């Protein structure tokens, strides 16, 4: 029991009592150390029993004075005796996933080492293909055993599985289930979504399939630069109007086995004229479910009599062109170079940015207080930009599950996990400095990018250009200016774009800690009413990042506390399972003001705003940085439609960008702002509802 001050040992010992459900007092020894009372029972408490801790009124502090005015009570329930409560698949399941694992869920923690000696399966699994893991999160033991599709399995669990105290499960269990068939699937086997073919020979592709009887294919001549390259592969995009041929291929073979078929793409002799083609694949055997469109496939075939080999260097690109029939070099061949959105390689970009002085030294063991939870969209964008792989992976942690705790005496809890969502992870935690270091590294290899480390003093906008005047008098002219300069955006102000602003009168107190127990990739969040919102994000190797959205007065108090006091606050969070905390260097916390900012528009004439320059949301959902990366993705897509012109600042693509982002940004702001208001209000009916 922890008190709010040092206690008188004799008084606290006399005031303490531990009783069972019958009211019988439990005997034991009591030790008082400063503000903490520790009681050790003389004999082990009963399992699955309710006990009451009571501190009688009148208990005295170490300094004496008036004792406690009220009797304090708290109840707890001891671990139950272990038993198996469920399995997945369940007994009698007839259509379990063909690659299912087998999971046993218990009502209490068990000793994982005692499971496999008492578990057997028919057909027997191969010891070399078995992988097991135990989750303390939900007391589950999972067996990955390499099942086969359309197969009957019988699992026998004999008595003997034990908990950490030596109690064993005495009942035996038998679980029978059958795995289902493999989902019908087919894939065109190419090294990527684009492949080159020789126009002098028949064009053939290999298709790998299972449980497929027929394939529907179509071939369309295309002009590549009519669309963003990635848009050709999007099954939601319309098909080209021109069609070379459409046909059906019959596939035969045993069920639930992979079959490879060689398909001739061209009609007649199989040859195709030189050019670019879109090849589509579909099948009536694909399940008609929400994932059907993801099973359809589109690939681009480049048919040519010439082979090109490219070598990229810092100064440019070297191209070797050879005739595919003779192997001889091809002279005088006109060559144009484009990026993925069909911007010509000659297009230039100027990055106007102050020197980034906030770098974390991993050699010192420092951990950046600014940590982001990046979603799949952000990670995919960073991967395409070759930034994700440049980051220090040892300082990135996957968020596999999220626990959300409500406030009040009967606080509820909501759980999310990547397994239920069928995703690799819900998000990834990354330090601000890790992202910036990787971006700096990527910029070293970016062609056509000039970095200017000076401050801007004025902005001039004309019909055809936007010009930035620097403090030294230099002028930078461009057809498009992108403002990514944060919540206090200079670009937004100079462009006279108004904002809606509201302060939450809160600050985000951020710091990093090492936790006593492993977090298992679980991010936790507590809505604490007047105490604000606490989030603990997993970092690698039993480390966590704290984001405490606290009212200004509490934030000020938190910033004045020692790291040890802040650790104690975290250890007292209701329902936290991480044990005690110790601060990570640098031990000092940071406090960041929280506000809602909504710009009147994300665009102006030849100007686009992204990230915090366009919108700022409450961090309770951890989506501020993800919204910014979503802006970048949408702006790239909008500009790709204008790629054939040299003017990337025309009104149409910018308007397309603003329309595309408006709904998602508004929805996120309404969601985070609404949740913040609901959990911040003291109104009793709303407190009850939440």
Image (cartoon, rainbow, N blue to C red):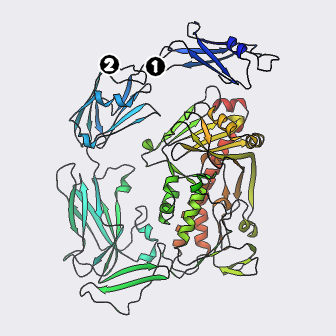
Name the element at disc 2: loop
The picture places residue 221, in percent across and down from the top left corner, at: 34, 76
Q: Is residue 298 above or below residue 302?
A: above
Q: Give the residue at mark 2.
A: 171
The residue that appears at 59% across and 72% down in the rendered structure is: 652
User: Which quadrant is the N terminus positioned in?
Assistant: top right
Most extreme residue toward the bottom is: 332
The residue that appears at 24% across and 65% down in the rendered structure is: 206
Mark 2 crowd level (few <14, some 14–19, many ≥20, 10 Å Cα): few
Residue 582: quarter of image: top right
Q: Is residue 626 visible?
A: no
The picture places residue 397, in percent across and down from the top left corner, at: 51, 49
Label 1, label 2: how far apart the Cα atoms are: 15 Å
Mark 1 crowd level (few <14, some 14–19, many ≥20, 10 Å Cα): some
Name the one closer to the observer, 447 or 182: 447
Instruction: Tell whether label 2 touches label 1 (CB within 8 Å).
Output: no
Name the one closer to the observer, 620 or 502: 620
Name the one closer to the observer, 407 or 240: 407
Residue 80 circle label: 1
Q: Earlier in the sequence, mark 1 or mark 2?
A: 1
Q: Is residue 626 above or below residue 575?
A: below
The picture places residue 284, in percent across and down from the top left corner, at: 28, 55
């Amino acid at each position: 029991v922890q008190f709010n001050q040092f206690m008188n040992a004799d008084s606290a010992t006399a005031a303490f009592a531990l009783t069972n459900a019958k009211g019988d007092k439990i005997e034991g020894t009591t030790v008082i150390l400063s503000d903490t009372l520790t009681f050790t029972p003389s004999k082990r408490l009963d399992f699955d029993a309710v006990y009451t801790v009571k501190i009688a009124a009148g208990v005295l502090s170490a300094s004496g004075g008036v004792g406690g005015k009220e009797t304090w009570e708290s109840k707890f329930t001891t671990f139950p005796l272990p038993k198996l409560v469920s399995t997945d698949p369940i007994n009698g399941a007839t259509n379990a996933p063909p690659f299912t694992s087998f999971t046993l869920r218990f009502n209490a923690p068990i000793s994982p080492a005692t499971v496999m000696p008492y578990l057997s399966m028919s057909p027997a699994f191969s010891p070399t293909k078995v992988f097991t893991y135990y989750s303390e999160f939900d007391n589950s033991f999972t067996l990955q055993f390499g099942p086969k599709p359309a197969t009957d399995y019988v699992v026998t669990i004999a008595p003997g599985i034990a908990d950490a105290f030596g109690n064993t499960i005495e009942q035996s269990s038998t679980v029978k289930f059958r795995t289902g068939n493999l989902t019908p699937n087919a894939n065109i086997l190419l090294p990527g979504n684009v492949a080159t073919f020789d126009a002098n020979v028949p064009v053939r592709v290999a298709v790998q399939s299972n449980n497929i009887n027929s394939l529907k294919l179509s071939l369309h001549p295309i002009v590549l630069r009519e669309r963003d390259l990635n848009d050709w592969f999007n099954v939601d995009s319309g098909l080209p109007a021109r069609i070379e041929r459409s046909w059906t291929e019959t596939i035969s073979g045993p069920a639930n086995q992979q079959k490879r078929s060689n398909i001739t793409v061209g009609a007649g002799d199989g040859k195709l004229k030189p050019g670019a083609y879109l090849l589509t694949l579909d099948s009536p055997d694909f399940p008609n479910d929400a994932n059907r469109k993801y099973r359809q496939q589109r690939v681009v075939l480049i048919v040519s009599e010439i082979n090109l080999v490219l070598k990229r260097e810092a100064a440019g690109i070297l191209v070797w062109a050879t005739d595919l029939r003779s192997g001889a070099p091809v002279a005088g061949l006109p060559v144009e170079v484009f990026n993925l959105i069909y911007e010509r390689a000659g297009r230039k970009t100027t990055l106007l940015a102050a020197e980034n002085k906030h770098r974390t030294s991993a050699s010192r063991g420092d951990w950046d207080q600014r940590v982001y939870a990046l979603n799949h969209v952000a990670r995919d964008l960073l991967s395409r930009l070759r930034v994700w792989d440049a980051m220090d992976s040892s300082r990135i942690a996957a968020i596999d599950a999220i626990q959300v705790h409500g406030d009040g005496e009967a606080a509820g809890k909501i759980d999310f996990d990547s397994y239920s969502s069928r995703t690799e992870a819900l998000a990834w935690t990354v330090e601000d400095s890790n992202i910036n270091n990787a971006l700096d590294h990527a910029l070293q290899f970016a062609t056509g990018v000039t970095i200017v480390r000076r401050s801007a003093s004025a902005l001039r906008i004309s019909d055809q250009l936007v010009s930035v005047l620097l403090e030294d008098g230099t002028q930078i002219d461009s057809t498009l200016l992108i403002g990514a300069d944060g919540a206090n955006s200079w670009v937004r102000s100079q462009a006279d774009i108004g904002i809606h602003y509201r302060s939450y009168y809160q600050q985000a107190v951020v710091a990093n800690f090492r936790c006593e127990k492993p977090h298992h990739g679980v991010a936790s969040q507590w809505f604490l009413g007047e105490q604000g919102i606490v989030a603990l994000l997993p970092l690698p190797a039993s480390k966590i990042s704290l984001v405490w959205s606290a009212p200004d007065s509490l934030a000020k108090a938190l910033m004045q506390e020692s790291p040890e006091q802040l650790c104690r606050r975290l250890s007292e969070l209701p329902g936290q399972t991480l044990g005690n905390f110790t601060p990570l260097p640098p031990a000092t916390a940071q406090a960041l003001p929280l506000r809602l900012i909504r710009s009147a528009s994300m665009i102006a004439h030849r100007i686009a705003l992204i990230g915090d320059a366009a919108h700022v949301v409450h961090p309770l959902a951890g989506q501020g940085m993800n919204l910014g990366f979503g802006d970048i993705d949408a702006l790239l897509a909008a500009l790709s439609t204008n790629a054939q012109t040299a003017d990337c600042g025309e009104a149409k693509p910018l308007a397309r960008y603003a329309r595309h982002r408006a709904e998602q940004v508004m929805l996120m702001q309404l969601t985070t702002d609404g949740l913040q208001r609901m959990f911040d209000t003291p109104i009793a009916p709303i407190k009850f509802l939440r």
